[in-house]
Amino acid sequence: MFISVDGIDGAGKSTQLDLLEKWLVNRGALVARFRDPGATQLGEAIREILLHREEIPLAIRSEMLLYMAARAQLVEEQIRPALASGKTVVCDRYLLANVVYQGNAGGLEIEDIWQVGRIATGNLRPDITIVFDLDASIALQRVGSGQDRLEKRGFDYFQAVREGFLNQVRFASDNCLVVDATPSPEAIHKKVTDYLAKLL
Protein backbone atom coordinates (compact mmCIF):
# COMPACT_ATOMS: atom_id res chain seq x y z
CA MET A 1 0.00 0.00 0.00
CA PHE A 2 1.32 3.41 -1.02
CA ILE A 3 -0.18 6.46 0.71
CA SER A 4 0.75 10.00 -0.30
CA VAL A 5 -0.01 12.89 2.06
CA ASP A 6 -0.10 16.43 0.71
CA GLY A 7 -1.60 19.89 1.11
CA ILE A 8 -0.82 23.56 1.34
CA ASP A 9 2.04 24.64 3.62
CA GLY A 10 0.74 25.31 7.12
CA ALA A 11 -2.06 22.72 6.97
CA GLY A 12 -0.54 20.54 9.72
CA LYS A 13 0.73 17.81 7.43
CA SER A 14 3.68 16.83 9.63
CA THR A 15 1.48 16.35 12.69
CA GLN A 16 -0.94 14.22 10.72
CA LEU A 17 1.88 12.13 9.26
CA ASP A 18 3.11 11.34 12.78
CA LEU A 19 -0.39 10.31 13.88
CA LEU A 20 -0.98 8.29 10.73
CA GLU A 21 2.28 6.39 11.08
CA LYS A 22 1.44 5.44 14.68
CA TRP A 23 -2.06 4.34 13.67
CA LEU A 24 -0.74 2.12 10.88
CA VAL A 25 1.89 0.56 13.15
CA ASN A 26 -0.75 -0.14 15.78
CA ARG A 27 -2.72 -2.00 13.11
CA GLY A 28 0.28 -4.22 12.48
CA ALA A 29 1.66 -2.55 9.35
CA LEU A 30 5.36 -2.32 8.61
CA VAL A 31 5.64 1.35 7.68
CA ALA A 32 8.29 3.00 5.50
CA ARG A 33 7.96 6.80 5.72
CA PHE A 34 9.66 9.13 3.27
CA ARG A 35 9.62 12.79 2.29
CA ASP A 36 9.61 14.09 -1.27
CA PRO A 37 12.04 15.62 -2.06
CA GLY A 38 14.43 13.82 0.25
CA ALA A 39 15.03 10.39 1.79
CA THR A 40 18.03 9.72 -0.47
CA GLN A 41 21.45 11.33 -0.65
CA LEU A 42 20.56 12.90 -4.00
CA GLY A 43 17.11 13.91 -2.80
CA GLU A 44 18.39 15.69 0.29
CA ALA A 45 20.99 17.59 -1.75
CA ILE A 46 18.32 18.70 -4.22
CA ARG A 47 15.97 19.63 -1.38
CA GLU A 48 18.60 21.97 0.03
CA ILE A 49 18.95 23.72 -3.33
CA LEU A 50 15.21 23.94 -3.94
CA LEU A 51 14.16 25.28 -0.56
CA HIS A 52 17.12 26.99 1.05
CA ARG A 53 19.83 27.96 -1.46
CA GLU A 54 18.20 31.19 -2.53
CA GLU A 55 21.47 32.59 -3.87
CA ILE A 56 21.06 30.05 -6.71
CA PRO A 57 18.53 31.41 -9.25
CA LEU A 58 15.95 28.83 -10.34
CA ALA A 59 13.70 29.14 -13.36
CA ILE A 60 10.32 27.54 -12.70
CA ARG A 61 10.99 24.80 -15.28
CA SER A 62 14.35 24.01 -13.69
CA GLU A 63 12.62 23.89 -10.31
CA MET A 64 10.09 21.39 -11.61
CA LEU A 65 12.77 19.16 -13.13
CA LEU A 66 14.86 19.15 -9.97
CA TYR A 67 11.84 17.92 -8.01
CA MET A 68 11.37 15.21 -10.64
CA ALA A 69 15.01 14.11 -10.38
CA ALA A 70 14.75 13.80 -6.61
CA ARG A 71 11.51 11.83 -6.96
CA ALA A 72 12.94 9.47 -9.59
CA GLN A 73 15.74 8.57 -7.18
CA LEU A 74 13.32 8.22 -4.27
CA VAL A 75 11.10 5.83 -6.22
CA GLU A 76 13.96 3.59 -7.40
CA GLU A 77 16.05 3.64 -4.24
CA GLN A 78 13.38 3.62 -1.54
CA ILE A 79 9.71 3.37 -2.51
CA ARG A 80 9.75 0.43 -4.93
CA PRO A 81 11.98 -1.74 -2.67
CA ALA A 82 9.78 -0.94 0.34
CA LEU A 83 6.61 -1.89 -1.54
CA ALA A 84 8.25 -5.06 -2.86
CA SER A 85 9.09 -6.11 0.70
CA GLY A 86 5.46 -5.73 1.77
CA LYS A 87 5.75 -2.46 3.64
CA THR A 88 3.13 0.27 3.74
CA VAL A 89 4.73 3.37 2.23
CA VAL A 90 3.71 6.77 3.57
CA CYS A 91 5.17 9.65 1.60
CA ASP A 92 5.20 13.32 2.62
CA ARG A 93 4.29 14.83 -0.78
CA TYR A 94 4.58 13.23 -4.20
CA LEU A 95 3.92 14.09 -7.84
CA LEU A 96 0.71 16.01 -7.13
CA ALA A 97 2.75 18.67 -5.33
CA ASN A 98 4.84 19.27 -8.47
CA VAL A 99 1.70 19.69 -10.56
CA VAL A 100 0.24 22.17 -8.09
CA TYR A 101 3.29 24.26 -7.15
CA GLN A 102 4.94 24.55 -10.56
CA GLY A 103 1.80 24.09 -12.67
CA ASN A 104 -1.24 25.70 -11.09
CA ALA A 105 0.78 28.24 -9.12
CA GLY A 106 3.90 28.44 -11.27
CA GLY A 107 2.37 28.68 -14.72
CA LEU A 108 3.77 25.55 -16.40
CA GLU A 109 1.46 23.34 -18.45
CA ILE A 110 -0.22 20.97 -16.04
CA GLU A 111 -0.46 17.98 -18.39
CA ASP A 112 3.22 18.38 -19.27
CA ILE A 113 4.10 18.02 -15.58
CA TRP A 114 1.92 14.94 -15.20
CA GLN A 115 3.65 13.44 -18.25
CA VAL A 116 7.16 14.17 -16.97
CA GLY A 117 6.04 12.75 -13.64
CA ARG A 118 4.93 9.50 -15.23
CA ILE A 119 8.38 9.16 -16.76
CA ALA A 120 10.22 10.09 -13.55
CA THR A 121 8.25 7.63 -11.42
CA GLY A 122 7.95 4.82 -13.95
CA ASN A 123 4.18 5.27 -13.69
CA LEU A 124 4.15 4.53 -9.96
CA ARG A 125 1.03 6.13 -8.50
CA PRO A 126 -0.07 6.16 -4.86
CA ASP A 127 -2.96 3.89 -3.95
CA ILE A 128 -4.35 6.67 -1.76
CA THR A 129 -3.74 10.42 -1.77
CA ILE A 130 -4.76 12.52 1.23
CA VAL A 131 -4.82 16.31 0.91
CA PHE A 132 -5.18 18.64 3.88
CA ASP A 133 -7.06 21.75 2.79
CA LEU A 134 -6.76 25.16 4.41
CA ASP A 135 -7.66 28.74 3.51
CA ALA A 136 -4.60 30.43 2.00
CA SER A 137 -4.65 33.37 4.43
CA ILE A 138 -4.72 31.02 7.43
CA ALA A 139 -1.94 28.93 5.88
CA LEU A 140 0.28 32.00 5.51
CA GLN A 141 -0.36 32.97 9.13
CA ARG A 142 0.56 29.48 10.31
CA VAL A 143 3.76 29.39 8.28
CA GLY A 144 4.88 32.69 9.82
CA SER A 145 8.59 33.48 9.79
CA GLY A 146 11.35 31.15 8.68
CA GLN A 147 9.76 30.56 5.30
CA ASP A 148 11.49 28.59 2.57
CA ARG A 149 11.85 29.69 -1.04
CA LEU A 150 8.33 28.61 -2.05
CA GLU A 151 6.60 29.87 1.08
CA LYS A 152 7.95 33.38 0.49
CA ARG A 153 5.95 33.75 -2.73
CA GLY A 154 2.97 35.28 -0.95
CA PHE A 155 -0.80 35.09 -0.81
CA ASP A 156 -1.61 34.83 -4.53
CA TYR A 157 0.79 31.92 -4.88
CA PHE A 158 -0.67 30.19 -1.81
CA GLN A 159 -4.19 30.71 -3.17
CA ALA A 160 -3.24 29.16 -6.51
CA VAL A 161 -1.62 26.24 -4.67
CA ARG A 162 -4.77 25.61 -2.68
CA GLU A 163 -6.98 25.74 -5.77
CA GLY A 164 -4.56 23.44 -7.56
CA PHE A 165 -4.76 20.77 -4.88
CA LEU A 166 -8.56 20.85 -4.96
CA ASN A 167 -8.66 20.66 -8.77
CA GLN A 168 -5.91 18.10 -9.38
CA VAL A 169 -6.17 15.64 -6.50
CA ARG A 170 -8.62 13.44 -8.39
CA PHE A 171 -5.91 12.69 -10.96
CA ALA A 172 -3.31 11.68 -8.36
CA SER A 173 -4.79 8.35 -7.22
CA ASP A 174 -7.79 6.10 -7.63
CA ASN A 175 -8.61 6.81 -3.97
CA CYS A 176 -8.48 10.46 -2.83
CA LEU A 177 -9.50 12.22 0.37
CA VAL A 178 -9.61 15.98 0.95
CA VAL A 179 -9.73 16.89 4.65
CA ASP A 180 -10.55 20.27 6.18
CA ALA A 181 -7.42 21.22 8.15
CA THR A 182 -9.10 23.72 10.49
CA PRO A 183 -10.46 21.40 13.26
CA SER A 184 -8.30 19.94 16.03
CA PRO A 185 -5.50 17.52 15.05
CA GLU A 186 -7.43 14.71 16.73
CA ALA A 187 -10.58 15.42 14.73
CA ILE A 188 -8.63 15.58 11.49
CA HIS A 189 -6.84 12.33 12.31
CA LYS A 190 -10.18 10.61 12.95
CA LYS A 191 -11.47 11.61 9.51
CA VAL A 192 -8.32 10.20 7.93
CA THR A 193 -8.40 6.91 9.83
CA ASP A 194 -12.15 6.43 9.31
CA TYR A 195 -11.53 6.73 5.58
CA LEU A 196 -8.51 4.44 5.59
CA ALA A 197 -10.17 1.82 7.76
CA LYS A 198 -12.84 1.35 5.09
CA LEU A 199 -10.21 0.83 2.38
CA LEU A 200 -7.76 -1.29 4.36
Image (tube, helix red, strand yellow):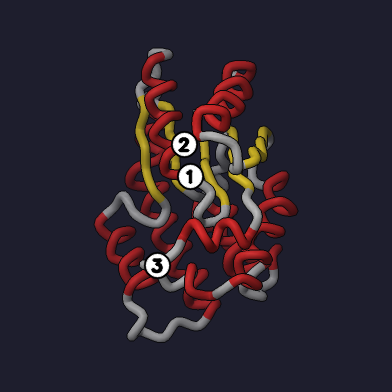
Distance between mark 1 and mark 3 Cα atoms: 18 Å
Label 3's element?
A: loop
The foreground one among 143 and 51 is: 143
Residue hosting label 1: 13
Image coords of residue 29 (percent x, y): 39, 19
At x 65% / y 55%, what residue is drawn? 135
Mark 2: few/some/many CA within 10 Å (<14, 14-19, 20+) = some
Q: Residue 145's mark?
A: 3
Q: Quadrant of residue 58?
A: bottom left
The foreground one among 26 and 16 is: 16
Distance between mark 2 and mark 3 Cα atoms: 22 Å
Q: In the picture, which quadrant includes the C terminus?
A: top right
At x 52% / y 69%, what residue is drawn? 64
Give, as a three-letter code, the residue at label 2: Gln
Q: Which mark sits nearer the N-terminus, 2 or 3?
A: 2
Q: Quadrant of residue 32?
A: top left
Mark 1: few/some/many CA within 10 Å (<14, 14-19, 20+) = many
The extreme left residue here reads: 41
Residue hosting label 2: 16
Tag 1 and tag 2, C-beta contact below 8 Å:
yes
In this view, the mark in front (2 or 3)? 3
Q: Is residue 155 left or right of residue 19?
A: right
Give, as a three-letter code, the residue at label 1: Lys
The foreground one among 187 and 53 is: 187
Give, as a three-letter code, the residue at label 3: Ser
- Vertical placement of residue 181 versus 30, above or below: below
Image coords of residue 22 (percent x, y): 38, 24
Q: Quadrant of residue 119?
A: bottom right
